[in-house]
Amino acid sequence: EPLTLEDVLNICDQEKPDGVIVSFGGQTPLKIAKALEANGVRILGTSTEGIDLAEDRKRFGKLLDELKIPCPPYGTASNLDEALATSATVGYPVLVRPSYVLGGRAMEICYDDVALREYMEKAVNVSPEHPVLIDRFLEDAFEFDVDAVCDGREVFIGGVMQHIEEAG
């Protein structure tokens, strides 16, 4: 059964935990983190602010710029015309996906305007509130996950994993 806010609040009411870790389980726990916090549940690990920073492309891009960390060109689009213009600026091939999705669902690599038009026609609710993200797709790239824990002073890297599927 899907995990719901009500389920987690009921468990917290019953078990009285010191807090809840929302970093496991994909998008569902990430989506209910703010509501849990608003209901007085302490979030352990990555804060709701950190989750939002990681998922909000504009905020994350600004942070990368401030830290002088390079990244492929990217943009957002709320309709087909914006998507075509952004893709022309970013340069094909592009990786297109709904905003606020980290798990790879509904992603597509578009190599030209025709493929982009097809994606936009079948894309989830594309609107100013729900734009699509458009990134330059890096052919033959590698994607890695680095799991780290920090106590505020020291960082421990517990694992580095290379993704087997195509990077995106």
Image (tube, rainbow, N blue to C red):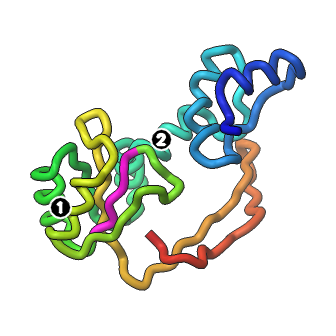
The answer to which quarter of the image holds residue 108 is bottom left
Q: Residue 154 carries which label?
A: none
Name the outermost residue toward the bottom: 140
Q: What element carries label 2?
A: helix
Q: Image point 76% across, 58% down: which residue?
A: 156
Task: Please tell me whether residue 16 is drawn above or below residue 137 in the rendered image.
Answer: above
Give the amino acid type for the residue marked by disc 2 in the picture: Leu
Q: Give the range drawn in magenta.
A: 94-99
Task: Give the quarter of the figure containing the C terminus.
Answer: bottom left
Q: Principal SS element in the magenta part?
A: strand
Of 114 and 41, the residue lying toward us: 114
Q: Which of 64 and 25 is in front in this view?
A: 25
Residue 159 image position (x, y, % from top left) = 74, 67
The amino acid type found where label 1 is placed reads Arg
- Which of the two discs, 2 and 1, sits closer to the camera? 1
Residue placed under numbered mark 2 in the picture: 53
Residue at x 62% of width, y 75% of height: 162
Quick check: is 133 in the magenta stretch? no
Which residue occupies 47% across, 41% down? Answer: 53
- Up the image or down, 87 lies above or below 49; here it is below
Residue at horizontal 37 percent and vertical 46 percent from the top: 99
In contact (CB < 8 Å): disc 2 and disc 1: no
- Location of residue 13 by image quarter: top right
Q: How crowded is mark 1: few (under 14 residues within 10 Å), some or many (20 or more)?
A: some
Q: Where is residue 141 in the image (x, y as percent from the top left)?
A: 45, 80
Q: Residues within 10 Å of mark 2 (few under 14, many from 20)?
A: some
Looking at this view, is 111 or 139 the one in front? 111
Q: Return the x and y of residue 111 as percentages of the image width and height.
A: 24, 75
Circle number at residue 117: 1
Name the side, left or right, on which 69 lies relative to 96.
right
